[in-house]
Image (cartoon, rainbow, N blue to C red):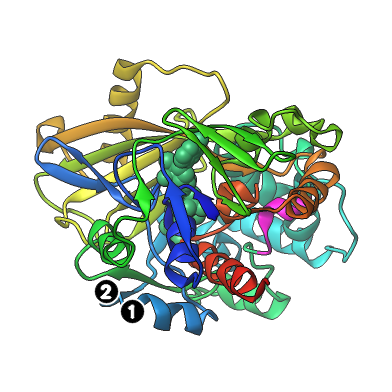
Amino acid sequence: MIFIIGAGISGLSVADNLKKDFTILEKNDYPGGLATQYRSGEYWFDFSGHYFHFADKVNVKKYVEQFSHFKEYKRDSRIYMFGKLIPFPVQYHLSYFPEKTRRKIFEEMKRRTEADHDNLKDSLVGNFGKTLYDMFFGPFMTKYYGRDLSDIIPAMDRGSIPVPDLKSVEEGLSGKNFSDKGYNPVFYYPEDNLRTFIGNIEKNLSGKIKYNETVLEVDLKERKIKTDKGEYFFSKIVNTMPLKGLVDILSPCPEWADGADKLESVSTLVVNLVLREKRENFHWVYLPEGPSRFYRAGYYPGHPDTACYLERSLNEGESHDIEEVRTEAVTILKKLNMIVSEAEIEHMDIRVIPGSYIIFNREWKKIVPGMLEKLKENNVYSIGRYGSWNYSSMSNDIKSGIGTADLLNGDQ
Ligand SMILES: Cc1cc2nc3c(=O)[nH]c(=O)nc-3n(C[C@H](O)[C@H](O)[C@H](O)COP(=O)(O)OP(=O)(O)OC[C@H]3O[C@@H](n4cnc5c(N)ncnc54)[C@H](O)[C@@H]3O)c2cc1C
């Protein structure tokens, strides 16, 4: 029997495409993992701002449309700097910078080289110059990843930060708008909502998901899974729980799993809100400037259009003070003109998503690819954003789910 650990979007995508017998073990009492909604008071919120990125993944889009109609959104994202909103991506829109600074940034960008960089900081300084790094990339990404960018390998930017050619930078300096540049200028969200979309996939799998059942131990030699409810023998496992957590429950722990304690991630603190009215029309805004640690604010798609969120990172083991978070959230909302007074906040919910972004630290390359291979040799396919300990979107997760099902379907 094939066991799938986790009924998130990755696990569901495997299950929905598997032609062999399987069981999903899911510790929650609902499907979807992070890719769904939770209820707070009378409102439903996504776990955070969720859009589907279908660009160049036409097959995934087609597959996904079996379960819901998707509305297309032309991305409108901005950066809040100098007390105003600058179109994203900032490196294309230097006309919004003070005269002297923009010339300096342009001169620095002209001197960029194709060098291979050892870390994310050097790579960003190399591509965009020190001035733009100090004003935007450095402070924004340090907030985002919660650490010094010299400790992160360049793969972390995943090629998602476009490096403009100099002609475009010059046109941007003269005021041309390039807000269609950068990754995924178009996004999608189910016309109903993410929860209903996930529910429609789950309907096909009735009886195959064991909810409220937590996997506690995996014995690779005996091919045995132990949960808080029982024991099962597996032929294969598809794992979607975090790789680091899986390695912790391998029993006995093989030698090749050493080093997993060096894998790092950050958590996201999300403030979800419903406001009395919608004063702005952007989808989301990046917040590089301090002292606030919030790095992004946005309105939700597919919700009452006054629903919005703020995000900031928390390091492992770091706590937060609710009152401080509240006060900071109100300050940011006012700054962005999303509210003019606190009385406009109808509802606020503060939630932490643990281990939400994995960190590409120097150990990542040494540990992760080898560990995934070893697991596969031991009949465990560890996939999805957290199972493969990588950066991925819901579309990537669906694609890897379908790919894994195809592999298993082909197995004798
Ligand atoms: C703040 C934030 C914003 C994001 N925004 C976007 C976006 O706009 N667009 C986009 O495409 N993606 C976005 N993502 C990424 C997206 O949410 C993930 O890629 C996707 O939800 C991961 O799905 P998954 O199934 O791989 O993992 P998960 O959703 O984590 O599912 C894993 C499942 O395993 C279960 N599980 C864990 N441990 C056990 C155990 N021991 N026993 C049994 N079950 C277990 C969990 O309960 C969970 O249901 C965002 C992520 C975050 C954190």
Whether residue 195 is situated above or below residue 227 in the rendered picture: below
Decide if residue 371 is on the left or right side of residue 311.
Answer: right
Q: Position of residue 323 (x, y in %)?
A: 29, 16
Decide if residue 14 is on the left or right side of residue 123.
Answer: left
Decide if residue 6 is on the left or right side of residue 196.
Answer: right
Q: Secondary structure at mark 2?
A: loop
Answer whether residue 227 is magenta in the image.
no
Whether residue 66 is situated above or below residue 256 in the rendered picture: below
Furthest toward the right, the residue is: 115
Q: Are marks 1 and 2 in contact (CB under 8 Å)?
A: yes
Question: Which residue shows up at 47% across the image and 72% down it?
Answer: 17
Q: Position of residue 244 (x, y in %)?
A: 65, 35
**Main SS of the magenta segment?**
helix
Q: Which residues are the magenta region?
A: 154-159
Amino acid on which the number 1 mark rests in the picture: Glu
Does the rendering let one see residue 19? yes
